[in-house]
Image (tube, rainbow, N blue to C red):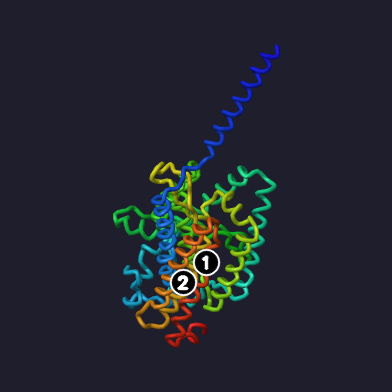
Amino acid sequence: MADVEESVSETIQQINETLNETATNATVRTPSTPEGMAIAYGSLVVMALVPIFFGAFRSVRYHKEQKGFSSMHEVDANRDPSGVNYSPTDDRYGGMFGMHVVEDSGETPEMMSSKDAAMFPIIASGTLLGIYIVFQIFSKEYINLLLTIYFFFLGVLALAHIISPGVRKLLTESFPNVPYHIILTKGSGEEKEDLMNYEFDRKDLVCLAVSSAFGLWYLLKKHWIANNVFGLAFAVNGVELLQLNTVMTGCILLGGLFVYDIFWVFATDVMVSVAKSFEAPIKLVFPQDLLEKGLDASNFAMLGLGDIVIPGIFIALLLRFDVSLNKNTRTYFTTSFIAYILGLFATIFVMHVFKHAQPALLYLVPACIGLPLFVALVKGELTIMFQ
């Protein structure tokens, strides 16, 4: 009897060891090779630069259109510095997802004030802590399900806005385009109030269909490429539409988020924990084991959209400052763009030296502010820059 009990005990022990070994093997990531890491971080750098570059030039056009500075008769003024000609009344920039232009409207675009910039890190800290607490209390699966649905709709609209000019250019005049206008009002007579007033056409519906296809792919598969498509769309829209009113406001914003990023990464595990738990396209990812596993890779390097959009709106502001100088140069944009690249590489280098997640703004903020200000000081334009 004792022999039987001993045999059963040994069998159970062997089964437990086998299960433990299987579980361990299932959670072990494929080791990152130097080549895989180089490809991953090189790709992240490129993906970070693309929305900043195109978003900055789109912000110039958006700013001009909102203030009514564009003119169909000024061809030179309608030349995008990136080499693309555009016209304020061009069909490529119309439609529900394009940029409507009211000629000489004089409308002032919404800007972030110095007060808004000072409050932003405080609000962001409260939001971050709130998300962290929610993840500690409720099931991560249910939270991420809600986030997935929410970002599905946001991503579809953001992507539709980005691809609208290209789709409109591809659809020729033979395309049976028909305009639509949806109006929903409340009340009657003098008390009549618009609740919904949307103008769109069939080209907008094509944009929405294409974006929805990507959205369904993201919704069903959560594939990293679909995540990056939505992430890039969010980043371009953010750099284009979020605008600072002065360089001083930009310095206040970046300075506050500089402290915010350092505190939440080094002083607590909140930032890293939320970034790993938050399954939404708020970060760009690229697999470090792509060479070994192909598109099914799972060992990802990541870069938060905040590390792209926040410096990006400051770089876009400097591009608009370049345009305002009327010197046909892009000195401050080029300087800040190069500074961002240097700051990003510094982040990656330090992260691998110390084997610890780094707050990217720790390196990006001094670079993106310091280098352009130094150039302005040398050129004697520092006072003009802060006016």
| In the displayed structure image, the side of residue 118 where residue 170 appears, left or right | left
Q: What's the residue type where badge 2 is placed?
A: Ile
Report x, y in % for residue 359: 55, 62
Q: Secondary structure at mark 2?
A: helix
Q: Residue furthest front?
A: 3
Which one is in front, 326 or 331?
Answer: 331
Q: What's the residue type where badge 1 is placed?
A: Ile
| In the displayed structure image, the side of residue 163 where residue 149 appears, left or right | right
Report x, y in % for residue 369: 50, 75
Report x, y in % for residue 363: 51, 67
Res 310 label: 1
Q: Which residue is mark 2?
A: 315
Report x, y in % for residue 75: 31, 76
Which one is in front, 385 or 340?
Answer: 340
Q: Residue at x 41, y 43 (%)?
A: 295
- Relative to residue 309, is residue 215 depicted above or below? above
